[in-house]
Amino acid sequence: MFRSSIGRKALMAVTGFGLLGYVIVHMIGNLQVYQGPDALNAYAKMLKGMATLLWGARLTLLVLFAAHVYLGVALYRENRAARPIGYVRFQYEQASVATRTMLLSGLVILAFVIFHLLHFTFAAVQPEYAEWKDPAGRPDVYAMVVHGFRNPVITTSYVVAQLFLGLHLYHAVPSMFQSVGLKHPRYNPLIRTLGVVIPLVIVAGNVSMPLSILFGIVGTSVGG
Amino acid sequence: MRVTLHVWRQKNARSEGKLVTYQVPQVDPDMSFLEMLDVLNEELVGKGEEPIAFDYDCREGICGTCSLVINGRPHGPEGGAATCQVYMRNFHDGDEIYIEPWRARAFPLIKDLVVDRSAFDRVIQAGGFVSVNTGGTPDGNTLPIAKTTQEKAMDAAACIGCGACVAACPNASAMLFVAAKVSHLGLLPQGQPERARRARKMVAQMDAEGFGNCSNYFECEAACPKEISVEFIAWMNRDYLKARLTEPDTVTPGMGAKVGPSPVAGHDATAKKHPVA
Amino acid sequence: MELDAKVPGGPLETKWERYRSDVKLVSPGNKRKYKVLIVGTGLAGAAAAATLAELGYGVEVFTFHDSPRRAHSIAAQGGINAAKNYQNDGDSVWRLFYDTLKGGDFRSREANVYRLAEVSLNIIDQCVAQGVPFAREYGGLLANRSFGGAQVSRTFYCRGQTGQQLLLGAYQALSRQVGEGRIALHTYAEMLDLIVDDRKAQGIVVRDLRTGAIRSYTGDAVILATGGYSNVFYLSTNAAGCNVTATFRAYKRGAAFANPCYTQIHPTCIPVRGDYQKKLTLMSESLRNDGRVWVPKESADRRPPDQVPDPDRDYYLERMYPSYGNLAPRDIASRAAKKVCDEGRGVGEGGRGVYLDFQDAMARAGEAVIREKYGNLFDMYHEITGEDPYRVPMRIYPAPHYTMGGLWVDYNLMSNLPGLFVLGEANFSDHGANRLGASALMQGLADGYFIISYTIGSYLATKKAGRLAADAAACRQTEQEVKQRISRILSIKGKRTATSIHHELGKLLWDRCGMARNEQGLKKALQGIPALREEFWHNVSVPGDGDDLNQALEYAGRVADYLEFAELLCLDALTRNESCGGHFREEHQTLEGEARRDDEQYSFVSAWEYAGPDKSPALNKEPLRFQRVHPSERSYK
């Protein structure tokens, strides 16, 4: 089944759906930054405490992510091969910028995810993060985040990456429904609405955090 | 009015092609685009030069033969029309017009602007039918069909098999063509007995022909002279996935078509069957 | 030449049933030993190919198109007749039979027409089973509409694309057999000659349009389903590719050509514009259900249509034919349009057009209803003319459309050449001197699905299976002649394009042998055609070579055949010194200008036999005997 064109598109949609779910959960968790250091650090500690679940989730995510990226690149290559000689002139009629840049936005997101993991999870960008503890002895994620986003270069890169994520989702959300055939005239307007609302909410939520830290709205308790 | 044409000329599949520029000095806005090319060809033939080869037949938008990419749009600027229904009143004096053939690996070029679309035929041969023999069918009125169902099936059945969907798709995907037939027959009660099998065979053949995948660009819909909706692609996706997930994987002998254009000479009636997924 | 129609004995109503009971059968095990070659993949060809392959015969199919689905049947708009009487309005097989026979002005073979009406019932059932999306009522049952020349509603339709849907049904049935390996399909394969050996049709010579390769194919029987020859007029509603070559080549190999002068001029086409047009576009006759045809009463009236008040309009069809009104048959409606234009009352460019007006229908039923019924036709008109028919009345004028004449066939649909069968528009048998709307689709499918499957057995059962070797002398000889002809065309290298010569021929025919004909004009045409032919063979320019796709060469070959065939057409028109159906001889009309038949002298089929180059063809007559009906004056008043 997953050698067929439609099967692979469905797989693309399903893995994408899983990743979207993660992005939403991830964002909701992170929004606790607005509740202050205690809430965020407790949340981080709780996650670390559920090792099996955490690693299970991490593994699932890795598989979903790898499959999604692999399929994206493989389909792209096949699609290029389906038209060996291109047009001298070609004019798009209705494909949006988002649709036409899925591979680009996908690769930007891939690069960002690697950077993000290195930055916070593996603390490879700023190695001192690994040592930071809060007064309760928990890893001080809050301070780490605030410190990180006070750097305008890092914040800018996060914001740009989120805009690409939004672009990616603007095509991806309605596309998922199309690729698995979950369309119906009655619900198509809802799908179109979701296609706008979901990317907007995700971009707004994710961008608000680094920006509010950069502009000193959040994280004032953390020292210079 | 006067237009300048940049036309893809290529002697045959083996030779190199290039854009050649022609001037057409006297164009009547009421001319159709193809009539404008006829006028140019008349002039070329009169000079003993080879005319531009391009496909056309009915010239009323139903046979699906005509196939030009005009200024980067399959079937030209009008939308909802085949190339033969494009009129010069859509262009302006002094326009530069680029004319290229359908471009897809599955549609090999034969000459100039003429391509071989027999891949579409093989997709239909693989399963785009209802398996009834002549005779012995029940009275047409024994099977009531809701008007809305019939209308929707007709929307899909309106496909003229021109290949503009493939030409317009950045992936050269044939999904809209295949979906139109899968939906036309799958929506009707007559098509139910073979519904799952049909979707599977036709998609397998489509894949084997070397068309690209669907990335939901929906350029096909915009180029379709019959304005067939991409909703039918969603319909086929569901139908196909359902067939794959619920039907046993049996290869039915006797269905499936050969891959590759059939040579006119020496066709073997017992040609090797294409293995179906 | 002996013309035996082989009509079975017994009462008209049971002839076909008895025939089917008596016809010799080929046993299932033997069927695959016979090979049938089918040329053309329109309704008749595709239906025949699918049906014969389903029965087990070896079938090879040839089309010059890139795909079987491109055949011109696809362009038929309006519908298909069948005597189902679903509307309970008094229809019956008899009534359909009688309407068709009368519509053809009693110049068709009674038994064939009756059989056609009979099998019309099965066609609808077959097509529904294939998934043809015929229009339905809200209750889910099949819908009908009325068509010209009938007072009942018996026409089944799929929007304005009935031909397309029926052809796709047949194409899909054909494709299924191709996929199963029972049919060998040859696309880009143009038949250029018929191989006759031992006075039997044994094969065809085909040119591969992509490579120029000339090859023979041989079989136990050859079926031509190659359509009509309206393109001899240059401007017609036919697709560019439609041509007379296959049937004309068969004629030159000994098959009789019947009634070539019976050509149908369709009343509702978009008028000619400019001199660059290559084809005319038909607007479905179904439009006459709701559209009213009119011209101004006064020839000097040049007001735009919306400023001509009702009393100043002449709804001439309603006036002249009150009982059929705007639904008068095609030949009659066309001639009436010509008449009012000749009187100087025509509208539009050159005064060659009449209005087809929907204002009353829209006022009565609402624009939405009209849009639902005819939306695609209105759009098509709008695209072509740039005028919006919802606001401004359509302008229409007659144009060559269908040809009732064709190769002569007997009741088995076999020509006088044993082994050569001819189906659909390519034969002559069912429509006499005029065809009613929605009957061409009926005939094509009847021939292909339900008649040839029986009648071909009557020939094959008497013949031992086995065919000529592809390198037999007859094949070699015919191939050689085809090749010589192609090289000759390529070697002329003159100054004129084939198009310009064809255009001139078409104009000559349209003026002299179009909607109205007379002795003097036909004689002029017969003088002019050989001169044009001479011009072609000395001065045509066909660039390129014969070794790859060469559209100019394909076309020139077809024009060369038109230049011979046109002469036959005019000769037939001259010989038939009466008016009937689409053949209107000005010398023979009633005081009111209607066609006047001469049953005493002309109740026969003219079957022309080729006599050799530069010799006048021989006329053979098949007398028309009417068992059940008495030819009457055809009145639609």
Image (cartoon, coloured by chain):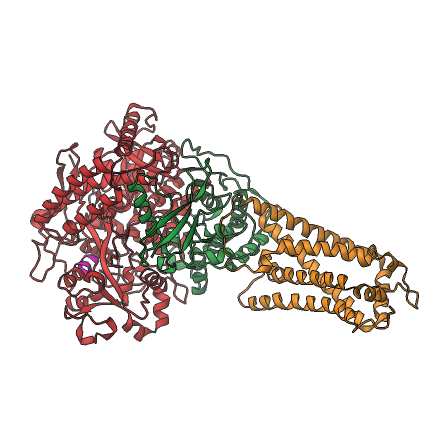
Q: Please state if B77 lies on the left or on the right of A78 as rendered.
A: left
- Choose between B116 and C69: the one closer to the eye: B116
Q: Please state if C626 lies on the left or on the right of C38 as rendered.
A: left
- Choose between C297 and C111: the one closer to the eye: C297
Extent of the magenta region: C330-334
User: In the figure, what tint was chain B given?
Assistant: green
Residue B150 visible in the current orientation: yes
**Occupied quadrant, residue A219:** bottom right
Position in image of residue B158 (x %, y %): 42, 56
**Occupied quadrant, residue C490:** top left
The answer to whether C190 is drawn above or below residue C439 in the figure is above
Q: Which chain is orange?
A: A
Please state, as top left, top right, bottom left or bottom right, where the N terminus of chain B lies in the image: bottom left
Name the residue rendered at 64%, 59% in the picture: A168
Position in image of residue C232 (x %, y %): 23, 46
Whether residue C282 is in magenta: the answer is no
Please state, as top left, top right, bottom left or bottom right, where the C terminus of chain B lies in the image: top right
Residue B245 visible in the current orientation: no
The answer to whether C557 is drawn above or below residue B218 in the figure is above
Position in image of residue B37 (x %, y %): 34, 49
Magenta span: predominant SS is helix
Q: Which chain is red?
A: C
Q: Please state if C470 lies on the left or on the right of B12 as rendered.
A: left
